[in-house]
Image (cartoon, grey):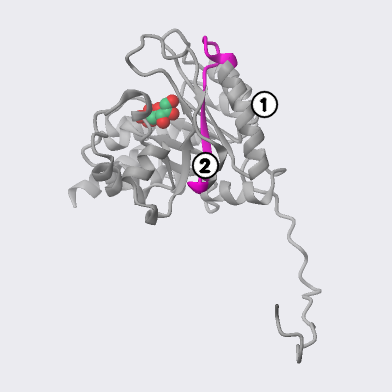
Amino acid sequence: MADAVGNKAAHEYYLDVPVKKTPFYAKGLNNTDWGMKDRLSRIFQPQSGNTVMLAFDHGYFQGPTAGLERLDVVIENICDHADVLMATRGALRSCISPTHNKAVCLRATHDMSVLFEDLSTGSGFSVDIEDAIRMNASAIAMQCFVGAAGERDSLENLCRAADLGYKYGIPVLGVTAVGKEMARNARYFSLACRILAENGASFVKTYYCDDFEKVVASCPVPIVIAGGKKLPEDEALEMAYRAIASGANGVDMGRNVFQSEHPVEMLLAIRKVVHEGFNGKQAYEYFLDSINK
Ligand code: 5RP
């Protein structure tokens, strides 16, 4: 306790300085608790309102994925250039140093492995919330199968995660899964994103598509786009640009980064789009300049 003897009397009340009443900058999240906002601010950078997430959670159902055979080598070398690491607790604990001090979006669901034909039968809630807190997770990610066999179970898991997330101040990322039979258009993604947001996701991950501004407009919380399969760098940067220009608040890319021959330069070019307003062409020129230095 502070010493009570000889204290100076309080005198500076800044009576001419109005109290700030700034609403929280992330879309639809103004009415959340302080701890939730603190974690969201580690994800969505306050300067731009956007985020660059690096996804390397593929092994949770794919096993060793091309480019991710050695997480300790590949991800350790590039992760400082991302805002958020999206990964499983197994990958983080075994291969990634906690000293990077990056925000973590912890994958908290498990699915059927790639050995099965139909991957959309449902996810299990695979992480105890106490372990997410122990991992200092800034968010937990829940895979959801809207319009597929696993819909009911995965939405139940999402709701349970949202309850626990609100209890402990941890945002939930709702991840829209795409199955073989599922459409990849604005109508479907609008439906899926809206359902995840209304069931408690604090932000949603989905795929870029034509008319993406309609997907963003009808989703009450921030959207980040998934990268999907590896594209040539110029196309991936153009996709990121179009998503941001349509109102997305970030990207969560995996293969388009770690399967690039120049993953660091690719991440830096993505940052230019997400945080600094570069268009796809400018970002690709920046990428080429960086690799030719
Ligand atoms: C799967 C995921 C993965 O994190 C994501 O798809 C991997 O990223 P990318 O598609 O960019 O390789 O959420 O649902």
Q: Residue at x 24, y 44 (%)?
A: 73
Kindly identify which numbered label has been placed on residue 132: 2
The kind of residue tagged 1 is: Glu
N-terminal label among 2 and 1 = 2
- Residue 227 seen anywhere in this rendered image of the structure: no
- Residue 21 seen anywhere in this rendered image of the structure: yes
Q: Position of residue 272 (x, y in %)?
A: 39, 47
Query: In this picture, which residue range is highlighted in magenta?
Result: 134-152
Taking the image in four quarters, ligand 1 sits in the one at top left
Kindly identify which numbered label has been placed on residue 183: none
Left or right: residue 104 versus residue 215 is: left
Residue 236 shown in magenta: no
Q: Position of residue 97 (x, y in %)?
A: 35, 51
1 over 73 or under it: above or below: below
The kind of secondary structure element at disc 1 is helix
Q: Residue at x 34, y 17 (%)?
A: 114
Residue 144 shown in magenta: yes
The kind of residue tagged 2 is: Ala
Kindly identify which numbered label has been placed on residue 198: 1
